[in-house]
Structure formats: structure tokens, C-alpha cells
Amino acid sequence: MNIDYYGKVLWNYHNLNQKIKKCDLILGFGSHDLNVAKRCAELFLDGYGDIIIFTGGFGRITKELWNMTEAEKFAQIAIDMGVPKDKIIIENQATNTGENISKTKELLNKLNLHPSSFLVVDKPYRERRTFATIKKQWPEIKFIITSPKYTYEEYCHFYTNGEISKDEFISIMVGDLQRIYLYGENGFQIKQEIHQEVWNAYNKLIALNFNKHLCK
């Protein structure tokens, strides 16, 4: 078995492939992945939401990459793609997934906005962790989670020439699997079943030194 075999096992586990439908609001989770911003814009322009909220300040990766917050970067991409500026709300203080949720809730309350349904957009290999976190920390909302429609192989190609490396991409998937387990155990997320095949791939990748994003 090779690295890409194990990487794809984790990719398939993290990606939930939920069927999308129109929601009141599109919620884009910030990160280094500009494909998420483009996916949010495409969904808005195709009529899947009436407004977009981008959430994200500076994360552990983007603080080294950009001189503007994730939310501001994503908003500019969406505007350049044709989304009206007045249809975008920016939450630019969150630095982790929990804050993405709590600070978005605070901002919506401050704006007196109470959407009944959310179309949540994150990276393909972050869908499950984001899903599990929202289910625990924002259980009252109805939401569907989706992501940029690219394959594992296409993401490997992006990261061969992108702002982070392919090795870091795989290390992030390894770290997120660990967090899905740990945060499910400590109550930060709802628990998710992890099959033995997924654990085997995780352990193989750690043995191959894809451990940069593991919790200490």
C-alpha cells in the first residue's frame, strides 16, 4: 500500500457527500483553501442561499500566508465572482472551529438574523469534523454540509503547487481524525464511528511521519 491509498481512506471518511438543497443562509468556514470561497459564491449564484456569512480570522496556517483575515479574503473572492457585497456578512475574529460557531451565533444575534436553515461549506476533508462540532455546539439549527466538488487526486494536485504542501494536506487529515476521536470523547463534538480500516490508515500515515498536525 502507498501513501495515497491511506490518504484516500481518510479523505473518504472525512467527506460526507450530503445532498444539498436551498437554505436561508450559506455559511463558509474560513481556512487556507480558497476553493471554499469559490464554492460558496457558486452556491449563492445558483440560488442555494439568500446571503453568505464567511467566518474566520487568522488560523495557524493563514497567519503565515495572508495580510487579511480568512473571512475578508473569502469575501473578496465571492465579490469578484459576482456576489453582491451587501449579500455578504463577515465574521473575522474566529481562530478555530469552536469560535467559528460561537462568534457566528453572536453576530447573527447582534444583527437580529434568525435563519431556519444553513448550507455549511468547508473543505472536503473537514466535513465530518465540522458536522460533528455543529451538532454538539449548535444543535438547534438545521443544516446541510457541503464542500468544493473536487477529488482527492485533484486536491493532491492543488497542493503540489499550492500555498501548502501535499504532505501538510495529508498531515491535516491525520490530525483531524485524531480530533474527531478526542473531541468526541471529551464532549466538544458528537461522537463519530471510526472503522478499523480508517484507524489502520491513520496509524500507517503516522508511522510515515504525517504527524505535524497531531495534538500534543
Image: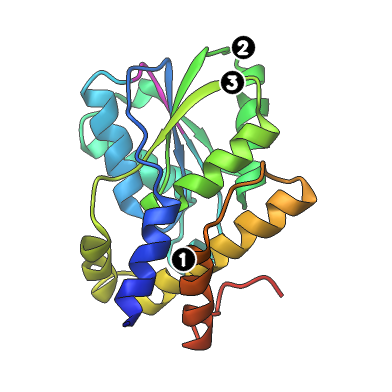
Q: Secondary structure at mark 3?
A: loop
Q: Amino acid at mark 2?
A: Asn
Vertical arrangement, residue 36 with respect to residue 211, above or below: above
Residue 59 in picture, x, y percent from top left: 56, 59
Instruction: Give the magenta-colored segment's residue range.
Output: 49-53
Question: Of discs 2 and 1, which sits in the foreground?
Answer: 1
Q: How many marks?
A: 3
Residue denoted by label 3: 141
Specify the quadrant that holds the C terminus.
Answer: bottom right
Residue position for label 2? 112
Q: Earlier in the sequence, mark 3 or mark 1?
A: 3
Q: Secondary structure at mark 1?
A: helix
Q: Position of residue 119 (x, y in %)?
A: 42, 27
The answer to which of 194 and 83 lies nearer the viewer is 194
As shown in the figure, which amino acid type bears the numbered disc 1? Glu
**In the rendered view, does 29 fall on the left or right side of 74?**
right
Q: Earlier in the sequence, mark 2 or mark 3?
A: 2
Task: State the residue lying farthest toward the bottom.
Answer: 208
211 is higher (above) or lower (below) than 72: below
| Front of the two marks 3 and 1 | 1
* SS majority, magenta: loop
| Foreground residue among 100 and 7 | 7
Q: Quadrant of the N terminus?
A: bottom left
Q: Residue furthest front?
A: 196
Q: Is residue 117 above or below residue 20?
A: above
64 vs 110: above or below: below
Instruction: Determine which quarter of the picture holds residue 157.
Output: bottom left
Q: Position of residue 73 (x, y in %)?
A: 39, 48
Residue 164 appears in the rendering: no
**Within 10 Å of the Cα at label 2, are there few (<14), some (14-19), or many (20+) other Cα atoms?**
few
Residue that badge 1 annotates = 197
